[in-house]
């Protein structure tokens, strides 16, 4: 054995320790941590902001550049899905409507 396994093992153990510490950080104290109201209100929007940060580039970019044409199946699918969501406020229906518009345009027409 030449010891080449030591560095990956240390890296894996270190990453596991950091992950455990950061995930358990809020469970370690015995009492609630004081948090300003502005921070508590802001944290309510963190999941939505993260989701928008992941999805928005996928909707307006292709191959790392902004889409150059309106003949892209994602745009009508997003418009239809957003319209359904504001009309009925249902997540499952939003997904179904978006895919029902996207798939025929993308697969059928090659957009």
Image (cartoon, grey):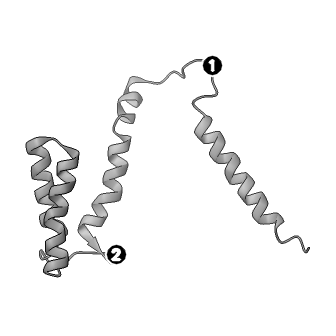
Q: Is residue 58 above or below residue 92?
A: below
Residue at the bottom extreme of this rendering = 110
For the residue pair 85 and 55, the one nearer the viewer reads as 85
> In which quadrant will I find the C terminus?
bottom left
Task: Find residue 71 and name its label.
Answer: none
Residue at horizontal 58 percent and vertical 40 percent from the top: 23
Of residues 66 and 30, the one nearer the viewer is 30
Which mark identifies residue 30? 1
Q: Quadrant of residue 81?
A: bottom left
**Which element is circle 1 on?**
loop
Q: Which residue is mark 2?
A: 64
Please indicate whether residue 31 sits to the left or right of residue 105 in the image: right
What is the residue that sits farthest to the right in this orientation?
1
Residue appearing at x 37%, y 43% in the figure: 47
Occupied quadrant, residue 95: bottom left
Give the mark, 2 or 1, whose residue is nearer the N terminus: 1
In this view, the residue farthest toward the top is 31
Relative side of 43 to 62, left or right: right
Percent coordinates x, y for residue 90 in the rendering: 18, 43
Residue drawn where x is 27% and y is 71% of the image: 61
Q: Considering only vertical position in the picture, is 103 above or below 23?
A: below
């Amino acid at each position: 054995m030449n010891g080449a396994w030591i560095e990956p093992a240390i890296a894996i153990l270190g990453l596991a320790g950091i992950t455990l510490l950061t995930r358990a950080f809020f469970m370690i104290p015995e009492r609630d941590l004081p948090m300003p109201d502005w921070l508590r209100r802001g944290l309510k929007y963190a999941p939505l902001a993260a989701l928008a940060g992941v999805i928005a580039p996928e909707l307006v970019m292709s191959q790392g550049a902004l889409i150059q044409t309106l003949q892209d199946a994602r745009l009508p699918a997003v418009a239809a899905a957003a319209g359904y969501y504001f009309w009925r406020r249902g997540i499952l229906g939003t997904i179904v409507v978006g895919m029902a518009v996207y798939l025929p345009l993308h697969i059928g027409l090659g957009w």
